Image (tube, rainbow, N blue to C red):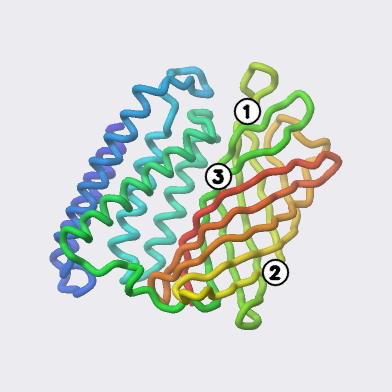
Amino acid sequence: MKRILSALAALFVALSALAAEKSDTISGHIHHHLASAGSALIVNAASTELFKHTIHELRPDRTSNRSFPSRHTSWAFTAATILSNTLYTNSPWWSVAAHAAASSVGQQRIIARRHWGSDVIAGATTGIISTELASFICRKIFRQTSLWATSPQCIFHPSLGVSSEAIYWLNSPSGKTLCAGFGTALRFRLPLSDCWGFDTSARIISMPVKIGDSYSDPLSAISLTLGAAGHFVLSDDRLAFVCNAAVGPCRWIGDNNVTPTRYSFNLELGSGFEWHITNRFGFRAQANYNIAASSTALHAIALSVSSLVVF
């Protein structure tokens, strides 16, 4: 907890130091940024601690009953969203890098057996919502223009995105239970026309596994996929409907013998919406159906949020 507070204090000092930079995009709105960041930290702390002290869920390593939600993940996504909201106009790479770091924290909490996947998902959701709520309220107080009002047309451009995924399994191998998982993906899309193009991704997922009533070591998988992507601008051209279909190899990591072989093929079918906040930065929210097929077929639904660098 002390490390988290120290990191957040450093973040707050860094935001304050930005005021010294004579930049129209930062120092001109420094009061809004500081108020938004401070409010987000307060809302997130109150929400996270309220859940922790009222929902008594036992940790996977059985060291305490305050597993839900993941405090580390909640603070990591709060810090990442604050940095993204502050620096996306300077460079979208700040936002994508912050998102990747926060998502890695969530994954580590599962691999270290400190949290269930649902704890990490709840922590990430709490961090993002508390920060965006504080930012929305501060924009109203400081009478700043809505981000939606200044959004450009969401046309199909090459993009590189970092995704955080909540994974819910629809079935499990005999004698085992795959719990909700958390994943991080790096996805690149290249248009070949106004509406169609290539989709390729590298993805790692981690999930707790139960065998009977006991908890086994977490299971992870790394997959690479290649396929097609669709991008259709809606009547409100600031928003686009997106879809993709991709297939590729998957490598399972762990000692749970979930599948008879360590390798399988992963098929992904997804759809969702994309929004470009600037000409170089945007978001994508998507729902995917995944099937990992070897001698045992494992089915899952994944809900993902992506930060995008648009080229």
Which element is circle 3 on? strand
Using the image, determine if residue 199 lies above or below residue 130: below
39 sits left or right of 283 in the view: left
Which element is circle 2 on? strand
Calculate the distance from the C-alpha at mark 2 to the C-alpha at mark 1: 35 Å
x then y, percent, for residue 91 = 36, 70
As drawn, which residue projects farthest toward the front?
A: 235
The three-letter code of the residue at mark 2 reads Ala
Q: Do the residues labelled 3 and 1 touch (CB within 8 Å)?
A: no
Using the image, determine if residue 210 lies above or below residue 184: above
**Quadrant in the rendering for residue 244:** bottom right
Question: Could you say which disc has been placed on residue 166 in the image?
Answer: 3
Using the image, determine if residue 36 lies above or below residue 151: above
x then y, percent, for residue 55 = 41, 23
Q: Which of marks 3 and 2 is nearer the N terminus?
A: 3
Using the image, determine if residue 232 lies above or below residue 134: below
Q: Do the residues labelled 3 and 2 touch (CB within 8 Å)?
A: no
Residue shown at 74% from the left, 59% from the top:
247
8 sits left or right of 220 in the view: left
Q: Disc 1 designates what residue?
A: 217
Quarter the N terminus occupies: top left
Q: Disc 2 designates what residue?
A: 228
Report the label total: 3
